[in-house]
Amino acid sequence: MATTVAEMSTAELREMIAESVEEKLLELLGDPDEGLELRKSVKDRLLRQQQAVAAGDRGELFDDVLRELGLDS
């Protein structure tokens, strides 16, 4: 990454700002999920999804989902 803002690309500047905002929000608000446990059913579903993605399953196409929901204006 560049050493001064003037030397940064637009993408680098956006990334730096996004990271700074996220850090500040976490500092101010904290993590609302901190200390909570996932239910077994949620853990199981996440594991199945992870395994499906690892096996190459990418789910439904975004455009197909929009069409099914009637949001494809």
Image (cartoon, rainbow, N blue to C red):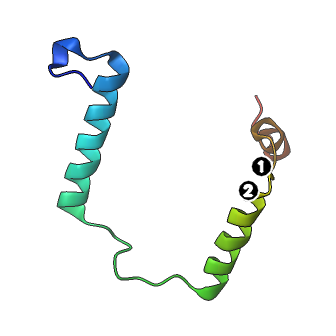
Q: Residue at x 38, y 73 (%)?
A: 33
- Label 1 residue SS: loop
Q: Are marks 1 and 2 in contact (CB under 8 Å)?
A: yes
- Give me the disc on residue 53: 2
* Nearer-N-terminus badge (1/2): 2
Marks 1/2: CA–CA distance: 6 Å
Question: Crowding near pointer 1: few (<14 within 10 Å), some, many (20+)?
Answer: few
Query: Label 1 amino acid?
Result: Arg
**Residue bearing mark 1:** 58
Q: Position of residue 25 (x, y in %)?
A: 24, 53
Query: Label 2 amino acid?
Result: Val
Question: Which image quadrant is residue 52 in?
Answer: bottom right
In the foreground, 65 or 15: 15
Question: Which image quadrant is residue 41 in?
Answer: bottom right
Q: On the rendered structure, is 49 left or right of 24?
A: right
Q: Residue at x 27, y 26 (%)?
A: 1
Q: Residue at x 27, y 33 (%)?
A: 16
